[in-house]
Image: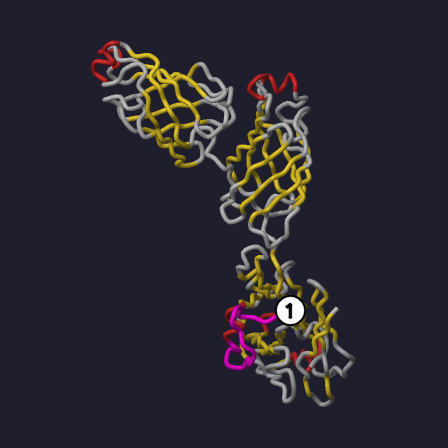
Amino acid sequence: MKKYSFIKYLLVSSLIFTIQSCDDEITSEFPDAKSPENMAWQANTNIKVNPVEDKEAFIWLTNVVTLEQYWGNDTVELKMKLNSIIPTENFAKIDFYLTAQETNGYNATPPYDTTGKLLTTTTDLPESGEFGLQINADEAYDLFKGNFVNPRITAPLLDGDLFEIHWIITNKDGTVLNSQDYVGGEYRFGFTTLHKEKKPPSWEGTFNYEWIYVSDGGLQWGGVKVGDKGQIEIVETTDALELNKEFDVSHLLFNYNYGGAGKIYLNYETGETYVEGSEEEKWIISNVDGPNLEISWTYKYSEGYDEYGTVILTRTDGEDWPENFHSPQTFPWGGKFDYEWIAATPDAENYGGVAVGDTGETNIIDASEGTYNVDHLLFGYNYGGAGVLTYDSVSGLTSVQGSEEEKWIISNVTATTLDISWEYEYSASYNEYGTVRLTRKDGESWPANIHTE
C-alpha cells in the first residue's frame, strides 16, 4: 500500500491530507480540524461525491505483447449531490477548481499552490441537487502543462500524479462557500493516476461453448447434440511478451466422445490460429463477433464416419475476440487447386477449346467470411469467366455465381479430390457440358459434407 503526500493546505491552523491508493481503491483521509458552525447556510451545505465504478482515476495502459501504450480511462466521472438547508434555486453557480501534484516535481514541496485552476462552472442545478461531473485527462493535463517539471516522453501522465477538485458555491445573494475552508470528503475529492499493464485477449481462460451443428455421424458416435453446452479451460504456456503463443486446451473437440487435449498456436500479430492433437484435430474459425466466434472441427475419422461439428465459443472475461483471429487457411476453398478435365461433350470440346485429359490450375481467393473470388468458373473453357463462390461452413453448401449463369454440381468427394460438373447459359442450346476433377494442393482433406444444391 502506498501513501502519497498531497497538497498541504495552510489555513488558520495547518492541515495535511493524504490520498491513499491501494490497487484500484482510491480514498482520501483527513485529520481532525475545526469546522465553522455558525456560518448560516454555509455550515449546512456540502457536496457528496461518488465516483463512477472504473471511472475513478486516469489509467494509462501498456500492451504487454506489442508494448503499445494508450488510455485505459481518460475521463474521471463523478456523481455529485448538493446537500443544503436552502433550495438549490438559491444558488447562482458552482465553480470547480483543480489542483495537481507530481511526485518529486510540481507542488511536491512548499510553497504549495492550493488555489488550483478553474476547471468548469455549473450554473444549471436541478432541484434534486444531483448532477454529474466529468474530468477529461487531456483538459486536466493541459491546465498544468506549464507547471509540471518531470519529462513526459512516452505518456502524458506519470504514475502517481495526483489531482484534487474543490469548489466555490455562490449564493444569489453574493455569499459564498469555499470548500477549502472545510474538512472532509464532502468538501473535496482527490484522485490519482495509474499505469497498468494490459494483457490482450487471446485464447487463455475459461470459455463457454454451445453446439450449433452436429453431423449424422457425430450424433451417432460423439455423444453430443445441437444445443448441448459446456466449458473448456485454455492455459497459456508461453511468456506474456511472446508474439508466437502456445496454449494447452483441455479438449479440442469440446468434450466430444473422441478427440482430446491438445495445443493451440497463435500468432498474435496476424491472429492466425491452428491446433494440434493426437487425433489430427483441426479447427476452422469463422463468424468472429464480439465475445463469440464459431469453430467447426474435423479429426482423423471425420471423413470415414461422417463426424463433423460446430460450436459457438464465448468468452467469459468481458473481452471481445480480436477480429483478426482466423484459421491458417481459408479452408476449404481458399487457395490454388489443380484440375483435370475428365468429361466433355463433343460440342464442348468443339466450342470450348478443351479436351478430356487437359490439366491446369485455378486460383480461389478468400474475399470475406464464406465468400471467395474464383478466377474462372469453367476452368479455362473459352466461355464463362471469373465469379464468386459462397460456402456455408456449417452445412457445407457451396454455390457459384457468374456473369454467364455458371452453375456447379459437386460429386465424388474424396479426401483430396472432388468432381465438378458445370453448365452455363448456353449449355442447353449448344450441348456444352463438362466435368473436371479438382485436387487440393495444401495437404488438407475436403469436408465430407461439401455439396451443391
Residue 83 percent across, percent down from the top left: 67, 69
Residue at figure coordinates x 48%, y 23% from the top left: 446
Q: Is residue 452 left or right of residue 283?
A: left
Q: State whether residue 341 appears in this view.
A: yes
Which region is colored magenta? 143-159
In-image side of 368 versus 122 (left or right): left
Which quadrant, please, contains the C terminus? top left
| Amino acid type shown at disc 1 | Leu
Q: Is residue 12 magenta?
A: no
Is residue 132 among what the camera can see?
no
> Could you tell me which residue is drawn at 56 percent across and 65 percent down?
134
Q: Quadrant of the N terminus?
A: bottom right
Residue 369 x %, y %? 45, 35
Which residue is denoted by mark 1 in the rendering? Answer: 82
For disc 1, the neighbor class at 10 Å (few under 14, some 14 to 19, many from 20) is some
Query: Foreground residue, 252 or 36?
Result: 252
**The residue tagged with tag 1: helix, strand or loop?**
strand
x, y percent for residue 275: 59, 36
The quarter holding residue 166 reads bottom right
Helix, strand or loop: magenta stretch? loop
